[in-house]
Structures are given as structure tokens and as C-alpha cells.
Image: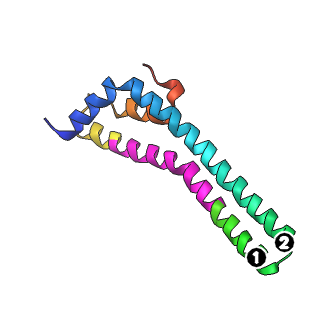
């Protein structure tokens, strides 16, 4: 049995756990960047109150890196979605139409549209 057929059948059979993981991913991609950005703004505010120019500059650079990290975390599921789309497209070209990567992709990244 090939690995792609095994993964495809797993995707079709495990929609409920995949949907739960999808809900977790959705919450993760929204809450974590917000927490990172709020903590960065809080640190920058504390540095501004202390009136030390070097500390303000360091905290501003830190906030910039936190913003970049928040954006990366937010778009990481979309990058995974694109990769899974490539895998599904490759499987269809090879004639493995019974592979259900679309089910995995939908349940993980759009849990409200996952049919249990």
C-alpha cells in the first residue's frame, strides 16, 4: 500500500479530530499574534515612560520583530494550505483520485466547512 493512499484514507476517516485541530489552529493564528503584539506595545510603553533613549530604541526594534513574528504566525496556516494543495494536485495528476487531501485541508484550515 502506498503512503499517499494511506494518508488519503486517514484524511477521510478522521474528520472529527482534524476539525478539532483546525479549530485550535484558527484560534492559534489569531490569539498568539495578538498577544505578541500587545506585549510588544506594553514593553515599548514602559520604555517610553522611563525616558531612556537607548531603551526606547531597543524596545522599538523588539516590537518590530514581534510584529514580523505575529505576521508569520498568522500566515503559517495559509502556507500549509498552499503546500497541501500542491500535494493534492500532484496526487490527482498521478491518478490517485481516491486520496482525500481536500478533506484534510478543509478540516484543518476551514473547520466550519468540514463535514463530520
Q: Position of residue 35 (x, y in %)?
A: 66, 50
- The residue under label 1 is 55
Residue at screen point 41% across, 30% down: 18
Are dots 2 and 1 in contact, CB under 8 Å? yes
Question: In the rendered view, would you say 9 is above or below 76?
Answer: above
Query: Which quarter of the figure is the C terminus placed in?
Result: top left
Element on which disc 2 rests: helix
- The residue under label 2 is 50
Residue at screen point 59% across, 59% down: 69
Residue 69, magenta (yes or no): yes
Residue at screen point 60% across, 48% down: 32
Query: Which quarter of the figure is the N terminus placed in?
Result: top left
Q: Quadrant of residue 42?
A: bottom right
Q: Position of residue 43 (x, y in %)?
A: 74, 63
Q: Quadrant of residue 55?
A: bottom right
Judged left or right of residue 15, residue 45 is right
Q: Position of residue 17 (x, y in %)?
A: 40, 28
Instruction: Using the image as rendered, state which of residue 83 and residue 112 is in the foreground.
Output: 112
Amino acid at each position: 500500500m502506498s503512503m499517499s493512499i494511506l494518508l488519503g484514507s486517514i484524511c477521510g476517516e478522521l474528520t472529527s479530530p482534524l476539525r478539532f485541530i483546525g479549530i485550535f489552529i484558527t484560534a492559534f493564528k489569531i490569539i498568539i499574534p495578538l498577544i505578541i503584539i500587545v506585549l510588544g506595545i506594553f514593553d515599548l510603553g514602559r520604555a517610553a515612560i522611563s525616558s531612556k533613549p537607548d531603551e526606547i530604541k531597543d524596545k522599538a526594534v523588539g516590537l518590530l520583530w514581534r510584529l514580523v513574528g505575529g505576521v508569520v504566525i498568522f500566515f503559517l496556516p495559509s502556507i500549509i494550505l498552499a503546500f497541501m494543495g500542491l500535494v493534492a494536485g500532484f496526487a490527482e495528476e498521478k491518478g490517485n483520485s481516491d486520496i482525500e487531501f481536500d478533506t484534510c485541508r478543509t478540516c484543518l484550515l476551514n473547520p466550519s466547512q468540514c463535514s463530520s
